[in-house]
Image (cartoon, rainbow, N blue to C red):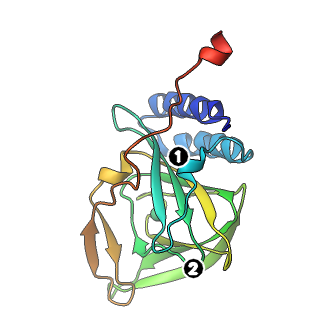
Amino acid sequence: MANVNRLRDFVIEATHLVEKHRDNESALLAEAKPLLAGLIASDDWLPEDYAVADPLRYRQYLLHADPLERLSVVSFVWGPGQRTPVHDHRVWGLVGVLRGAELSTGFSRASDGRLVPGQEDRIESGDVVAVSPTIGDIHSIANALPDAPSISIHVYGGNIGAVRRASFDPQTGEERLFISGYSNERLPNLWDRSRENG
Ligand SMILES: [Fe+2]
């Protein structure tokens, strides 16, 4: 059975950080990064329902949303060969690889409007990378494994599935607005403390 209390403890600590650093994104990211690294250092807590790949498209399962929508935690599950379009977030975000490996490419905008890719980084399980409008918000992510799923845990400074944001044609820089939603209708129960309190 999944050790879901790790996720609950993470949610509690991340909520404290959002409250503590509400006007200081860099301080928030500096503390949230090692917190997420601690969560993904163990792979015994993600319930199976939120680790299922889809043959056609990557999945994004909401694991937790802050009631004030300051924070969301999402499990991204990538089948072999699956990747995001080039896209932005419009809030801060952290990506931590739980299982497998991913390829992350940041983009910057040239003076003629085109998007120029930076280097492609391979992020291994245990690694955490950050995005935000202040440090670079446009990227693409792909499963690095040709023959197995990869899973990353993402934390965002908002209810990311409800944020109106953009994907891009990297050749022209043209943006297309989208709202991602989530792949699941039910969330894991983090709050049954009967075993520890019984
Ligand atoms: Fe992203």
Q: Earlier in the sequence, mark 1 or mark 2?
A: 1
Q: Position of residue 102 (x, y in %)?
A: 63, 69
Q: Which numbered dot is residue 167?
A: none
162 vs 87, nearest the viewer: 162
Tell which of 83 and 114 is nearer to you.
83
> Residue 124: x and y, percent?
72, 64
The answer to which of 109 and 81 lies nearer the viewer is: 81
The quarter of the displayed image where residue 150 is located: bottom right
Q: Locate residue 8: give its quadrant.
A: top right
Tell me, yes or no, if residue 61 can be seen here. Answer: yes
**In the image, which is nearer the foreground, mark 1 or mark 2?**
2
| Ligand 1 within 8 Å, label 1 CB | no
Number of numbered markers = 2
- Under mark 2, the amino acid is Gly
Residue at image point 27% right, 66% down: 178
Quarter of the rendering occupied by the C terminus: top right
Query: Can residue 136 be seen in the rendering of this structure?
Result: no
Image location (x, y in percent) of residue 96: 62, 54
Q: Is residue 58 above or below residue 120?
A: above
Disc 1 is placed on an element classified as helix
Q: Is residue 34 left or right of residue 52?
A: right
In the picture, the disc for residue 81 is 2
Give the x, y percent position of residue 161: 35, 53
Q: Going 41% across and 50% down the picture, which residue do you hit? A: 184
**Residue designated by label 1:** 26
Q: Quadrant of residue 19?
A: top left
Q: Is residue 79 left or right of residue 116?
A: right
Is residue 190 depicted above or below 87 in this figure? above
Q: Residue at x 26, y 74 (%)?
A: 176
Instruction: Report if the beta carbon of the residue with label 2 is closer than 8 angstroms to ligand 1.
Output: no
Residue 2 vs 123, above or below: the answer is above
Judged from the image, the secondary structure of the residue bearing numbered disc 2 is loop
